[in-house]
């Protein structure tokens, strides 16, 4: 066992018995590199990454590669999900040096943590023009002995290059920027649904921007792009037609052949996008996809303690995607007389579509939304048959940031679909995450009873967003107060002023530079999510400090988005809410809320502040301006304000409904 044996991360534990003398990132490894004056071999990945497994098996289980690493380097393993800050810093180095990035990420560092070489997957030996790990290590070790000064100089120059403080621009947010972004998406749009070629990624935050823009500008073109993408993804093999949930991405342009790993963050964000599409269009197909996605999360990733695990592996029994693939003969054996109609419905052919096997899909099925009699029963039978296969690997970490997204998804589902079980899941997750927060400062992750690693920007921003969505569905002011407390600490420790929010806190252990970015990746930018949170808190609490911080962040975002609008879609999503602000509504009552109140507010993009005698004190702590609003002896009294203008009190739900236009 190497130095990883005491770690909690499933990814690090997968490497604990490698012949490589791995260290986790930390002072022990860094001081050893300085003491021995050896370069650091840094390998960053995550437990559901297929190519991380391939490189681990081919290279890190190799005695030859291990001997070179142990003799000439200090080898450090990092789980990118535990240390997004390290991943951001050294992925920037890889992209600067190679023009691309990905995982596994492989970086060679000086003892002062400065990168002088970076790449991704390496086979054990060079082949077909691709550099091998053994050759890289041999040459790097030689250069370290013979020309160390050149490597140290390269490390300093690369570190200086990536440490340029970003973002650097600032501009006034405007509706013209949103229009430019919509046109940019239009230019990149693939009529088959989605943006760009293979591999094709869902990018739900871009869809949320397009859906918001479509509603606010009454733009049918934006809605068409969002709908075409949502439809094709749900019809494709990237969506698990039996068990629900989306795979990480599609390897082809049609959404047919996925990379089979499933993650919590993708499915939470996609569920929000499908819920929003259902809210705007009323199409039952979107509702069904959202439900199947959320039910997948509840069934496969829900931890008994209340949070959600990170995700499931792509591999089953050593075969990528083996859990999800079927031959036609296998389907005939399992389904009997139902097999023919099932195969026609899901596009199963004798030759298959992936190495002789089939991926269930509806891409060529024009009746996809209306399955005939018997299909659901056949799906149920095949689903239970599939459960007998080798189980998928599970990353059983609970990440605060990803669980914040899950809270948002389940709370939205509870509100929009009116399903109590989804709202209860959001409450349970929020309650569990409360145990990972100390003095409004969250830990980043939890596993097997232990919280670890100080929270980073995404943890504050996504958890606050989730709590605000929970407050919209369940108007307990404790949710609002928790969100405000997190946001206050976020501003105290992450605010970079005019340059935007940093990824790491001001009291975290320093890296070679302190990263910050507004560009979205697989996840929305934490700074963009923070701007949305700050806007909503300013409106709900009436506190000017939240508005001032939101204004600074959005001005920074506008400067970045002007250069690359499609890379800043979640900032633009937040900006749309600032440019088209919904009303502020305070409802006071001693009675049960009218059943239609919260759904009506959701349709009008309003989060109401509900004041009752029981909750008046805690609501006043979260939103001090509500203290002066009287609670009537009977009935409902509502106060509606927009853009600095407040209307007369509205008595009764019918009056409110009329004021909001139904």
Image: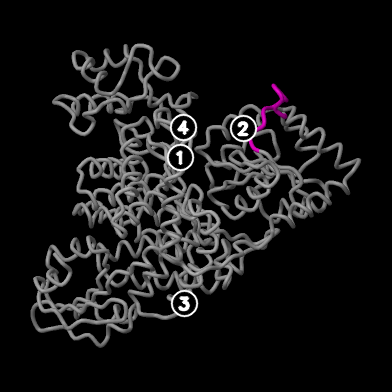
Give the residue at mark 2. Answer: 56
In the rendered image, residue 602, in percent from the top left (x then y), is placed at 24, 61
Residue 201 - label = 1
- Whether the residues at callouts 2 and 4 have beta carbons within 8 Å, the answer is no
Describe residue 151's horizontal placement relative to residue 119 as left or right.
right
Evaluate whether residue 75 shows in this view. no
SS of the residue at dot 2? helix
SS of the residue at dot 4? strand
> Residue 125 or 604: which is nearer the viewer?
604
- Height in image: 217 above or below 291? below
The figure's colour scheme reads one colour
Residue shown at 55% from the left, 56% from the top: 563
Tell me where residue 414 sits by quadrant.
Answer: bottom left
Residue 548 - label = 3
Rounded to the nearest angstrom, the CA distance separating label 3 from label 4 is: 42 Å
Residue density around tag 4, few if under 14, some if 14–19, many if 20 or more, within 10 Å: many
- Whether the residues at callouts 3 and 4 have beta carbons within 8 Å, the answer is no
Q: Earlier in the sequence, mark 3 or mark 4?
A: 4
Position of the N terminus by quadrant? top right
In magenta segment, residue 559: no
Range covered by the magenta-colored residues: 120-131
Rounded to the nearest angstrom, the CA distance separating label 2 from label 4 is: 18 Å
> Residue 11 or 207: which is nearer the viewer?
207
């Amino acid at each position: 066992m190497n130095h990883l044996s005491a770690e909690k991360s499933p990814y690090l534990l997968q490497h604990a018995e490698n012949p490589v003398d791995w260290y986790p990132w930390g002072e022990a490894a860094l001081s050893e590199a300085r003491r021995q004056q050896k370069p650091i071999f840094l390998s960053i990945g995550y437990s559901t990454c297929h190519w991380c497994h391939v490189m681990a098996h081919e290279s890190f289980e190799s005695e030859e590669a291990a001997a070179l690493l142990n003799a000439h380097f200090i080898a450090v393993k990092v789980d990118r999900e535990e240390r997004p800050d390290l991943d951001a810093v050294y992925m920037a180095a890889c992209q600067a040096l190679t023009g691309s990035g990905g995982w596994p990420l492989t970086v060679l560092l000086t003892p002062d943590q400065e990168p002088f070489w970076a790449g991704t997957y390496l086979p054990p030996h060079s082949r077909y023009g691709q550099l091998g790990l053994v050759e890289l290590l041999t040459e790097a070790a030689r250069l370290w002995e013979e020309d160390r000064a050149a490597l140290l100089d390269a490390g300093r120059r690369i570190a200086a290059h990536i440490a340029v403080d970003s973002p650097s621009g600032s501009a006034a947010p405007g509706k013209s920027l949103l229009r430019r972004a919509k046109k940019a998406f239009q230019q990149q749009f693939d009529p088959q649904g989605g943006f760009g070629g293979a591999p094709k990624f869902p990018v739900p935050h871009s869809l949320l921007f397009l859906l918001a823009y479509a509603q606010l500008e009454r733009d049918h073109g934006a809605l068409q792009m969002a709908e075409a993408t949502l439809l094709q993804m749900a019809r494709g093999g990237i969506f698990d037609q039996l068990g629900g949930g989306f795979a990480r991405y599609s390897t082809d342009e049609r959404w047919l052949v996925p990379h089979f790993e499933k993650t919590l963050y993708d499915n939470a964000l996609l569920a929000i996008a499908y819920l929003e599409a259902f809210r705007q269009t009323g199409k039952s197909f979107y509702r069904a996809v959202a439900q199947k996605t959320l039910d997948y999360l509840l069934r496969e990733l829900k931890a008994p303690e209340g949070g959600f695990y990170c995700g499931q592996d792509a591999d089953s029994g050593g075969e990528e995607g083996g859990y999800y693939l079927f031959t036609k003969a296998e389907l005939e054996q399992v389904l009997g007389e139902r097999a023919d109609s099932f195969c026609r419905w899901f596009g199963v052919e004798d030759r298959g579509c992936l190495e002789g096997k089939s991926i269930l899909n509806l891409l060529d099925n024009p009746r996809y939304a209306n399955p005939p009699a018997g299909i659901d029963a056949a799906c149920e039978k095949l689903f239970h048959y599939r459960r007998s296969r080798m189980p998928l690997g599970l990353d059983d970490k609970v990440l605060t940031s990803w669980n914040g997204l899950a809270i948002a998804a389940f709370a939205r589902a509870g509100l929009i679909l009116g399903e109590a079980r989804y709202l209860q899941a959001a409450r349970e997750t929020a309650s569990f995450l409360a145990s990972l927060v100390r003095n409004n400062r969250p830990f980043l992750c939890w596993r097997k009873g232990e919280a670890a690693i100080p929270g980073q920007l995404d943890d504050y921003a996504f958890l606050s967003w989730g709590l605000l969505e929970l407050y919209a569905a369940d108007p307990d002011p404790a949710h609002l107060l928790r969100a405000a407390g997190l946001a206050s600490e976020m501003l105290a420790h992450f605010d970079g002023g005019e340059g935007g929010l940093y990824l790491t806190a001001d009291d975290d252990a320093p890296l070679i530079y302190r990263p910050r970015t507004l560009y979205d990746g697989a996840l929305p930018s934490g700074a963009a999510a923070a701007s949305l949170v700050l806007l909503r808190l300013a409106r709900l609490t009436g506190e000017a400090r939240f508005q001032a911080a939101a204004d600074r962040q959005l001005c920074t975002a506008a400067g970045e988005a002007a250069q690359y609008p499609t890379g800043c879609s979640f900032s633009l999503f937040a900006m749309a809410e600032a440019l088209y602000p919904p009303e502020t509504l305070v409802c006071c009552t001693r009675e049960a809320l009218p059943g239609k109140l919260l759904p009506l507010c959701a349709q009008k993009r309003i989060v109401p502040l509900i004041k009752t005698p029981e909750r008046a004190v805690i609501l006043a702590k979260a939103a001090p301006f509500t203290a002066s609003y009287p609670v009537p002896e009977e009935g409902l009294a509502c106060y509606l304000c927009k853009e600095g203008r407040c209307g007369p009190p509205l008595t009764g739900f019918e009056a409110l409904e009329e004021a909001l236009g139904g």
